[in-house]
Image (cartoon, grey):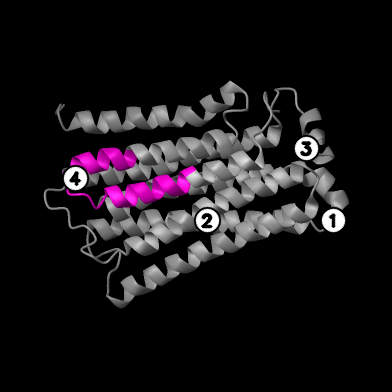
Amino acid sequence: MSTATPPSPRTYLAIWGWLAGLMLLSVLLSELPLSGRTIALIVLALSTVKALLVALYYMHLKFDRRWLAFVAVFPLILVVVAVGVVASSRLVRL
Amino acid sequence: MSQAHAATVESVSTGIPSGKLGMWVFLASEVMFFTGLVAAYIVLRLGHPAWPGPEGHLSVPLGTLNTFILICSSATIVMALAASQEGKLSGTRGWLLATILLGASFLGIKAVEYSAKFSHHILPSTNVFWSCYYTMTALHALHVLGGIIFNVVVLGMTGNAQAWLRRGHLLELAGLYWHFVDIVWIFLFPLLYLLS
């Protein structure tokens, strides 16, 4: 059950436009003569924005019950912890 | 809201239909699976003193085209859901068929890419980059194939209006799965094609 009215087809098309535009922007930015680290940060940030647009509007997380979003986000928290442990093991040798 | 969707709403006590909640829990496990793979790739990438990379053997235009195809397919399946919620069964059928064809196109292009690699004797054993590339893209392609099968099953249900009243909610579940597959590719494409 949604807590709000789902978006209209017009909104879906607008989101499609944003997704396609951000994809092209990522490709163009990756060709710029910037440092690899800078490009990686920008491109991955754009990917995160695209993923959020899909999750919020196409998967309706923005319009569903809030705790459903927690179900989606919780594994990401676990992954961050796991990667943090792996990364820290390079700094701290037990 | 159509009768099919109304029926699923009535069958819940948590506020969320059981099937939808189950799909989200399943997707949560899939998030763990793919982010684990991506995290392993990043750790390998950062820890490798001389990262081999694709060395010009990955086509950015083909990767971009495939990304565009998946973005379009996400839009078509959500349009199918919108049509279903408006009670337009023929519209639902058309958008769903478009989604299936776009998914098949994605796999076709991926097959062309794989074929080109194999013809150049680029295999998973070539180096660490190609091991990661084949592992992540093949597992993603299997998920796309699973999504296509799911969509075909749902498309088959649109042939019977009475059955659709009972099972139309499966379209929302198929859509959730399909969007997840799209999100995974949204991250795989830049990691493998643009930043490698």
Secondary element at tag 3: helix
Across and down, in percent, residue B63 comes to 38, 59
One can see residue A38 in this view: yes
Are the residues at dot 2 and dot 4 in contact (C-beta closer than 8 Å)? no
Q: CA distance from mark 1 to mark 4?
A: 54 Å
Helix, strand or loop at label 1? It is loop
Instruction: Quickly name the residue at label 1.
Output: B160
Q: Position of residue A86 (x, y in %)?
A: 25, 33
The residue lying toward the viewer, choosing from A5 and A87, is A5
Q: Amino acid at mark 1?
A: Asn
- Circle 2: residue type: Val
With respect to residue A50, does A91 lie above or below? above
**Residue B21 position within the rendered picture, expressed as x and y whole percent measured from the top left:** 64, 32
Q: Main SS of the magenta segment?
A: helix
Q: Which mark is residue B5?
A: 3
Identify the element where label 4 is drawn. Answer: helix
Which numbered disc flags the more N-terminal residue, 1 or 2?
Answer: 2
Query: Do circles 3 and 4 both sit on a common chain?
Result: no
Q: CA distance from mark 1 to mark 2?
A: 26 Å
* Residue A68 disc label: none
Reading the image, the residue beneath label 4 is A36
Q: Are marks 2 and 3 on the same chain?
A: yes
Relative to A68, B4 lies left or right: right
Mark 4, Cα crowd under 10 Å, few <14 / some 14-19 / many 20+, is few
Q: Residue at x 71, y 31 (%)?
A: B17
Q: Is residue A65 magenta?
A: no
Estimate the spatial distance between the alpha carbons at disc 3 and disc 4, rounded to whole Å: 48 Å
The residues colored magenta run A18-44
